[in-house]
Amino acid sequence: MMELNKAASIILIGVILSSPAYAERFVFGSSGFEGDSNDSPDNGLNITTTAGNFFVATSSSGWWNSEGAHKQINTNYIAGVARGCCGSDANFNNFFTFDLSNVTGSVLSASLTLNSWDIVGPGPLDYSLFDITSPLPEVRATATGNDLSIYNDLMSGSIYGSFSYTEADENKLRSIVLNSIGISALNGALGGEFGIGGSVAPIPEPETYAMLLAGLGLIGWVAYRRKSA
């Protein structure tokens, strides 16, 4: 009985400590590559202020992955889990920056328009916009890995808005309405530079659930045997 208890404990600890495998699912997959940007000229912020309507195109875009890597020359703004993308099997968060120096008045409403390009994986893909607290020059800079702070920054903090993508949205322009938190942040950045991070919520592979269920099942069986003994 003691051996069974030990085996059950080992399995449970393994399940808890192991990193779950995530199914490949991403949006914006072909949005740009090194030296060959596919960034749409329609990508940008549509802003309504007390002084009128403004369109601010993205001044830069890109990704950081779960290995802490990023290439400044690569403008692909992929978000989600991808196999072999940009030389890596990893999770990707994206970012966009904007020059707000020509926007006047007080921001009343705004939305971020993006071309979705490729959409891969089971949907819907829940994509959320986040604030960026890292210095924007560092967000744009090339990194070779080992620094996950910016990657984490792009998927945490204040949420500015969200959109659920499906295959029907592939290679189409979609607008994500910014909430009151995003509007407040825009107002605070007027006259300067503004950044937005983005992330797709991952879904664990079926094997991850199977391992968890197996561990819980074994523990339940051990508890039943102990009760019956």
Image (tube, rainbow, N blue to C red):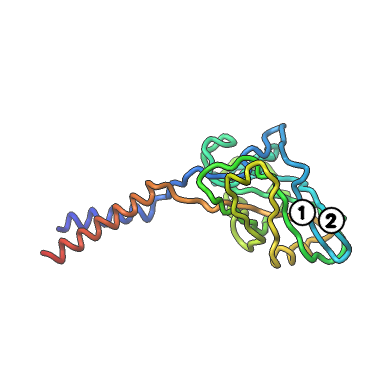
Label 2 sits on residue:
54
Check the picture and name the quadrant holding the N terminus: bottom left
In the rendered image, residue 23, in percent from the top left (x then y), is placed at: 47, 45
| 92 sits to left or right of 33 | left
Specify the quadrant of the image occupied by residue 86: top right
Q: Is residue 183 visible?
A: yes
In the rendered image, residue 114, in percent from the top left (x then y), is placed at: 70, 48
The kind of residue tagged 2 is Phe
Mark 1 or mark 2: name the one nearer the start of the chain. 1
Viewer-closest of 138 and 202? 202
Up-down: is 209 above or below 179?
above
In the rendered image, residue 92, in percent from the top left (x then y), is placed at: 58, 46
Please give the label number shown on residue 92: none
The kind of residue tagged 1 is Leu
Distance from label 1 to label 2 (Cα)?
8 Å
Q: Secondary structure at mark 2?
A: strand
Going by the picture, which residue comes out furthest to the front? 168
Q: Secondary structure at mark 1?
A: strand
| 59 sits to left or right of 148 | right
Residue at 29% across, 54% down: 215
Specify the quadrant of the image occupied by residue 164: bottom right
User: Are discs 1 and 2 less than 8 Å apart at CB?
Assistant: yes
Residue at 44% across, 50% down: 204
Viewer-closest of 68 and 165? 165
Label 1 sits on residue:
45
Crowd class of label 2 (few under 14; some 14 to 19; many from 20; radius 10 Å): some
Check the picture and name the quadrant holding the C terminus: bottom left
Crowd class of label 1 (few under 14; some 14 to 19; many from 20; radius 10 Å): many
Residue at 38% across, 49% down: 208
| 228 sits to left or right of 65 | left
Residue at 53% across, 49% down: 123
